[in-house]
Image: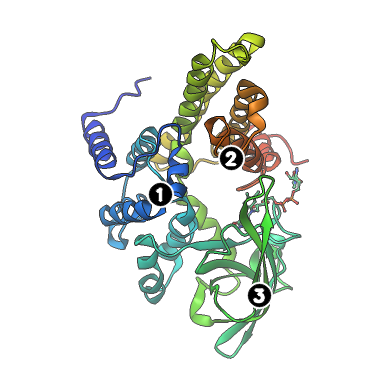
Amino acid sequence: MDFTDSPEEAAFRSEVRDFILREAPRPKPGESGQEALVSGWAANQEWFKKLGAKGWIAPAWPKEYGGASMTTVQQFIFNEEMALQKAPRPLHMIIGLGMAGPTLIVHGTDEQKQKFLPGMLKGEDIWCQGYSEPGAGSDLASLQTRAVRDGDDYVINGQKIWTTLAHMAKYMILLTRTDPDAPKHRGITYFILDMKSPGVEVRPLYNLGNSHEFNEVFFDNVRIPKENVIGEENRGWYAAVTTLDFERSSIGSATGMKQHVEELVEYATAHEAEPTSTLRTNPMLRYELADRMVEVEVARMLSYRVASMQARGLIPNYEASSLKLFSTELNQRIARTAIHILGQYGQLRGDDAPTKGRWAATYLRSQAYTIEGGTSEIQRNIIAQRGLGLPRD
Ligand SMILES: Cc1cc2nc3c(=O)[nH]c(=O)nc-3n(C[C@H](O)[C@H](O)[C@H](O)COP(=O)(O)OP(=O)(O)OC[C@H]3O[C@@H](n4cnc5c(N)ncnc54)[C@H](O)[C@@H]3O)c2cc1C
């Protein structure tokens, strides 16, 4: 199989690379692209505006809506170059750009598109996703937050949980139950909620690494105007599913993982002469690093498979689950290998720790990768049933 770029693809790759090298804020030595994002907030806002001006902040969106209409292969190249050059990604905007925007493009009215899309494209508005509830995660369609029509508004009561960035978001995409008597997938309505609406209460939840990333959100008689329904009443499930078709963000992650393993090899080699070197005290670490590098190549092949299906107009199903499952579990294994290489230092966090404590933080955060976006068990169920043709359990 030939993975080399065609002449057009090579030209596109150079255009992307030149742009990133010219315009993107550079991470400091040893810093990842996302760490640079946090440490250089103002510079990054400028960078996102520049990406927005080219339509590259929303590579998959159609040009008429301010995106770049990139083909799947172009998105692949774009994501790969962003990862290779460690360019900061607008991840805090991913729910707006990757989910709410695409859903509006497909199901929204003209007024909704005019009102909500520009703020996403300028890199200004942060959105959050109000899907999961305490009793509805993997089985999302059993959600219970109620919306009841009252004149020109709907009145919302209930609770969401694990709502990433709700404390910073201007808007939420919100799934509610409007018909409790209908079969569970058919009684759901999809709204846009202004987070400043009276009756919305956001309470912080702290993750394993003690970071405030997600929240609980409570709704006490919150009013949403009927103009903020996306699609039709009781047909929100179909809009919620459409959203997922636009997501291509995992494509560049194999490149990022490869860089992490390379960084670990560099770190282990640079410290090999020291008496505390784990590479000396534990020769098996060489094998562990070798395994991680092989696995990164497997992840790359799985992501090529998904991208090549998308490029042929096919919708990856258990293939996408295989990629999600393998990559997120690999991310955890890479973080574990990093902790083994750093030895006792691997547990330290803060600026004075080796690599500024990055691997301790990554290790803790990586535990969530196999939960968010569908747990590993759910991915295995999909692979077993749809990929292997096994019966439901
Ligand atoms: C970091 C992070 C960020 C998140 N951000 C958001 C967000 O912004 N918005 C949002 O709406 N949600 C968000 N979530 C929630 C996420 O979507 C859910 O946590 C996830 O879907 C799992 O649901 P649950 O937590 O209710 O677990 P449950 O569904 O209750 O699952 C509990 C356990 O049972 C297993 N299980 C469940 N069903 C089956 C089955 N049929 N077969 C085998 N095993 C099963 C699961 O794999 C899991 O191990 C986030 C989660 C995390 C960790």
Q: Residues within 10 Å of mark 1 (few under 14, many from 20)?
A: some
The residue pinned by badge 3 equals 178
Q: Front-most of 183 and 43?
A: 43
Mark found first going from the N terminus, 1 or 3: 1
- Taking 40 as reference, is 388 above or below it? above
Q: How many labels were placed on the picture?
A: 3
- Image quadrant holding the C terminus, namely top right
The quarter of the picture where residue 109 lies is: bottom left
| Measured Cα–Cα span from mark 2 to mark 1 | 17 Å
Q: In this picture, is 140 found above or below 177?
A: above
Task: Give the residue type that dot 2 points to.
Answer: Gly
User: Which residue is under mark 1?
Assistant: 40
| Distance of label 1 from label 3 (alpha carbons) | 43 Å
* Residue, disc 2: 350
Which residue sits furthest bottom? Answer: 151
Question: In the image, what residue type sits under mark 1?
Answer: Gly
Q: Is residue 277 left or right of residue 89?
A: right
The alpha-carbon separation of the residues under discs 2 and 3 comes to 47 Å
Which numbered disc, 2 or 1, marks the residue closer to the eye? 2
Residue at screen point 55% across, 88% down: 152
Nearest the viewer among 215 and 149 is: 215
